[in-house]
Amino acid sequence: MKPSLAQRFATAFLEGGRWKLYLQGLGTTLELTVVALIFGVLLGLVVAVVRSAHDQQRVGRRNPVLGVLNVLCQIYTTVIRGTPMLVQLFIWTFVIFPTQRNKILVAFIGLGVNSGAYVAEIIRGGLMSVDAGQSEAGRSLGLGYFDTMRFIVIPQAFKNILPSLGNEFITLFKDTSLAQAIGGMEMLYYASTIGGRTFDYMPPLLGIAVMYLAIVIVFTWLQGRLERRLRESDRR
Amino acid sequence: MIDVKNLSKSFGDHLVLDGISQHIYPGEKVVVIGPSGSGKSTFLRCLNLLETPSKGTITFHGTVITDPKVKIDQVRQQMGMVFQHFNLFPNMTIRKNITLAPVRTGLMKQEEADELAGSLLQRVDLTDKADAYPSQLSGGQKQRVAIVRALAMKPQLMLFDEPTSALDPEMVGEVLDVMKELARDGMTMVVVTHEMGFAREVGSRVLFMADGKVLEEGAPAELFGTPQHPRLKDFLSKVL
């Protein structure tokens, strides 16, 4: 007799306290997301500032060091955005760190470096979205480039990039499932292991799909609230 | 005070300024008029290097500021600039707009700057707006704040880039009044404007620009009374 649907789910989630494994996987997934995001935002900020600083230099006063950095940053964003995430993860795992046992550590690096390239473009877009008159006004008052960025441009850019940054967070959160392919023990890893052990893939996979979805929905809602609050300060 | 020699500026193939030489003396009120596209705003923006000249030199108090080695921020601290679109910082209160630069450049302490902001705002009748944000102000009020924001740096020279062109007609007067008062106090001013009445009343010298050149210059009475160049005659017949 075939087991009922309820039985199949019970096998996948309750038997032998398996639900704990999913939570363990979820913990790793969230950890991967947060660490990679922080890494990505820091990296992205540096790249974005280098690239826009380079673009805003006065003609005839170009800084050669900045020129070299700018080219490096351009290569970085081009390569990372132009190759598949999974290929990058495999290269980190099997080519760059073949002896590293801690696959989560490799995944941190792979995801963070990947995310940084996208975040850099998001931040750069945000910096460019601030009217040129704003930095002209700052500079005309005698403020330096960094003070102008810090007090005038970046605070205004931040509001403009929040939606795209939230989007990047969601993408990154789901992309952590790719870490399974290099042996990172996150949610998908446990789901497929349990699927293999019970010879029934449907319940664990549907289960984690719902978990991913639920978290994205909650996050989207939070993001909407934050954006509404920032907009309110516009009307004042 | 400022000596401009053979200044040229081109954007790509387009020559916007064509070999301008001018000298601006302390206390002078130079008004620049001319049809749109004549290069008058570009000329003004070259004076504090918001635009980098393609050719020529600009000397400010004996310093060749077009030299790439010059610390341009220090030069700009001595030149105030007022823009057509105000360019107040929307993320800060009016007080913070005024005090940010003097404090960050080390010109004064926050308390001093706050005090100065208070007296400057009083001068332009906006004391009650110190804690407001730019979005709560009318165009005329914004421009008056923009003027005192520049004044808070205690500049030796003020540059005005069409300060009334983006204003509703009924607000032009209040901004011009502030500028007239500033002129009476002896500030050196370079003003790009379409307000011929202002040019006539306040200007000590008027430059007429077209096609990137100064075609005619002189005291307002002669320039407006007996224009010589056909382009100027044509221009005046359209605007007066």
Image: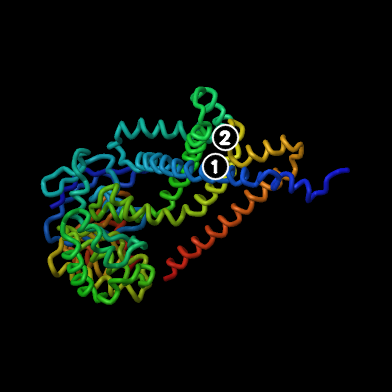
Question: Up-down: is A170 above or below B195?
Answer: above
Residue ID at (78%, 48%): A7
Q: Chain of mark 2?
A: A
Furthest residue toward right: A1
Q: Nearer the viewer, residue A92 or A73?
A: A92
Which residue is at a point 17% across and 60% down the rendered structure image?
B109
Q: Residues within 10 Å of mark 2 (few under 14, many from 20)?
A: many
Q: Position of residue A23 (x, y in %)?
A: 60, 47
Q: Which mark is residue B28?
A: none
Measuring from the top left, give residue B148's x and y in whole percent: 23, 66
The kind of residue tagged 1 is Thr
Q: Is residue B205 visible?
A: no
Side of A128 relative to B5 (left or right): right
Circle 1/circle 2 CB separation < 8 Å: yes
Q: Residue at x 55, y 50 (%)?
A: A167
Task: Say left or right for A170 vs A204.
Answer: left
| First in sequence: mark 1 vs mark 2 | 1
Visible in this render: residue B123? Answer: yes
Quarter containing the C terminus of chain B: bottom left
Q: Is residue A177 left or right of residue B20?
A: right
Q: Label 1's element?
A: helix
**Residue type highlighted by circle 2:** Gly
Question: What colouring style does the render use?
Answer: rainbow
Circle number at residue A28? 1
Marks 1 and 2 sit apart, C-alpha to C-alpha, by 9 Å
A235 lies above or below B84? below
Q: Find residue A184 and name its label.
A: 2
Q: What is the chain letter for disc 1?
A: A
Q: Position of residue A11 (x, y in %)?
A: 74, 45
| Residue A193 on image: x %, y % | 67, 36
